[in-house]
Image: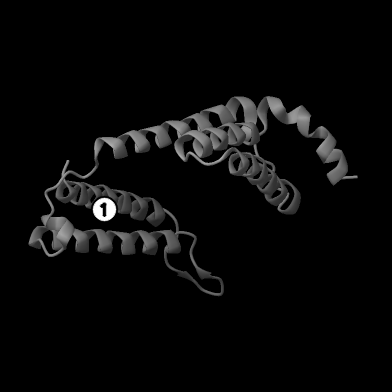
Amino acid sequence: MTVRTAEFVMAIVLSLCSIGLMIKSAELNIGWIEGRGPGSGAWPFWLATGMLICCLWTLWRWFRRITPESRNTSLYMSHQTMVIVGTSAGAILFLLAATHWIGLYASLVLFLLFYLKYVGRHTWVLTIVLTIGIPVFIFCLFEWALKIPLPKAITEPLFYPIYDLMYS
């Protein structure tokens, strides 16, 4: 796929997504509600409208070959880039699937360990610090500060002592 083709395909795909969002948003009230403000569908509808306008502008510029991308016939992604993108997508899919069985925090630890060390090729010190620090930060933010529990699956019992400290 060339850069020119990729720009065209993405403009079409995003245009279709915009139209879909506009249709779904219009099922709600997209007008002004007296004494309350905009209806619940107003912001999504108008943001999707803005996105559609940008996509149509991109397509217009593509057809006229105004931008360097619209004239570029070189390869969009090299083999090395495809490997990195594929590895990243696979790792994210693992993170999402594993969250169902071992919980978000355990999945995040495995994801960060793999991604930082083997994809990013960072040092062990940075990998360990971030692999521990990011899940702890997310736990403190969501579970403690915002009181929003995130899925823990089979690892839930490991959190009971922490809950005892938090809620005592």
The residue at the far left in this view is 64
Please provide percent x and percent y for residue 149.
69, 42
Mark 1 Cα shell of 10 Å, populated few (<14), some (14-19), many (≥20): many
Which kind of residue does numbered mark 1 sit on? Ser
Q: Residue at 63% x, 26% y: name it.
A: 102
* Helix, strand or loop under label 1: helix
Q: Nearer the viewer, residue 15 or 10?
A: 10
User: Left or right of 29: which side holds 68?
Assistant: left
Q: Nearer the viewer, residue 153 or 137?
A: 137
Q: Is residue 60 left or right of residue 51?
A: left
Q: Position of residue 21 (x, y in %)?
A: 36, 52
Residue 60 position in % (x across, y down):
14, 62
Q: Is residue 105 above or below residue 147?
A: above
Q: Quadrant of the C terminus?
A: top right
Residue 137: image location, x then y, percent = 68, 48
From the image, tell me which residue sits under label 1. Answer: 15
Q: Residue at x 87, y 39 (%)?
A: 164
